[in-house]
Amino acid sequence: MPDVFADLVGQDEAVTELRRAAAAAAAVLRAAATDRTPALVAAGEAETGAGTPDPSAGMTHAWIFTGPPGSGRSVAARAFAAALQCAYGTGCGECPGCHTTMGGTNADVRLVVPEGLSIGVGEMRALVLRAASTPSGGRWQVVVIEDADRLTEAAGNALLKAIEEPPPRTVFLLCAPSTHPDDISVTIRSRCRVVPLRQPPATAVAEVLVRRDGIAPDVAQWAAAAAQGHVGRARRLARDPEARKRREAVLAVPRRLTGVGAAFDAASALIEAAEAEAEASVAEADTAERAALETALGAGGTGRGAAGAIRGAAGQLKELEKRQKSRATRAQRDALDRALVDLAGFYRDALTMALRAPVDPVHTDTAALAGAGAQKWDAEGSLRRLEAVLACRAAIDANVKPRIAVEAMMLALWKG
Ligand SMILES: [Zn+2]
């Protein structure tokens, strides 16, 4: 049985640091059990203190995992949470602490996964309050916040207060793309230790697909390269024929751009494909949630009062619909972003070929097409097109309407 860090692909430095921290955290617990200096050292102070080595020096109560999407931020946070709850302090992968944390059932590990576009203040306050309680398993209360960059300002402030005056046994693990102030407020950042994750190399991604998911080596290699270091995306490409079909449609775009009309058609197709993909990904959860809420509210009941209960429940259903809509918007943006990353990979291939750079193509299956593009556009034209794709991503990120941003991009790709 591999330990809890096994799936953190190509992140040796981070894993070393987290193992050391987990060992230090275990030392803190042992010291507390024997009544010796049980305090954690705050972030930033650990390495500056001269004199006798402190057994807790590798550990602190607030962490930020940063890295590009798919690099394994949340995988790292969960693995570290498991190591903190591990009976041996190592993340052995076998003890109940490791098992329950990795399985998402540990009572002392709370996971916040924002479904909509942001994490609200109400949710954060409730979380902070519960995180202050004594850990029932006798080790740590761990709060994992995925996509901490989606905290609202008010939620960020509620979190900051907890991080500034942390309960003695509470550990906060935040995940964000970077420590840029747009992603994480400077004050929260200053209270946390940062664990930067890298984009894992394709060979490491392929290796884990073969070992963990039993995917054939040649398929794993192709998928790892095509996914550009995104582990989850690589697995989906290797396993899901629908995902492969969507990718092929995206990579057919450069060939289809033969005029203004075709550019607008391509924009529509891309937007609609993202919508369809998003709808498919949330539909099941939406239906299940609605059914669960209706059951809880007594729908389908035939007794007296059932109709009245439904009327009173309209507000709750509305609230659910609002949440679901927000999640659908997020899913659409994520789907569109994946398509744009694929497209950027294609023009990057054209650029590296035009420059005769000694690097492997991202998309081996469209390498010939990218080569033809390189000849036609030269390095400058390839670079302009790559920039058009990146500008589209940036515009959508800055809340430009996706259709408008994509139309502008397609025209730029056509004109060159
Ligand atoms: Zn364990």
Image (cartoon, helix red, strand yellow):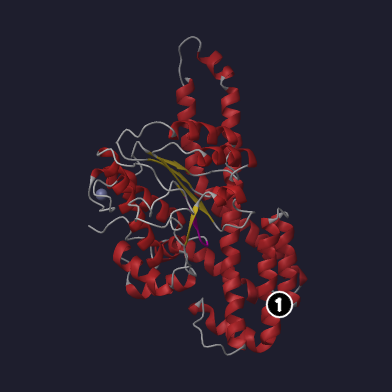
Q: Report whether 96 appears left or right of 367.
A: left
Q: Residue at x 61, y 86 (%)?
A: 372
Q: Dominant secondary structure of the magenta stretch? A: strand
181 or 169: nearer the viewer: 169
Quadrant location, the C terminus: bottom right
Is residue 65 within the magenta segment?
yes
Q: With respect to residue 200, does 310 lie above or below? A: above
Q: Residue at x 26, y 44 (%)?
A: 30
Residue range of the region highlighted in magenta in the rendering: 63-68
Crowding at dot 1, Cα within 10 Å, few <14 / some 14-19 / many 20+, comes out as some
Q: Position of residue 225 (x, y in %)?
A: 46, 73
Instruction: Examine the image and state in which quarter residue 262 appears.
Output: bottom right
Q: What residue is disc 1 on?
A: 384
Instruction: Examine the image and state in which quarter residue 85 appears.
Output: top left
**Residue 185 seen in the figure:** no
Identify the residue at the far front of this view. Answer: 51
Instruction: Examine the image and state in which quarter residue 108 appears.
Output: top left
Q: With respect to residue 33, does 349 lie above or below? A: below
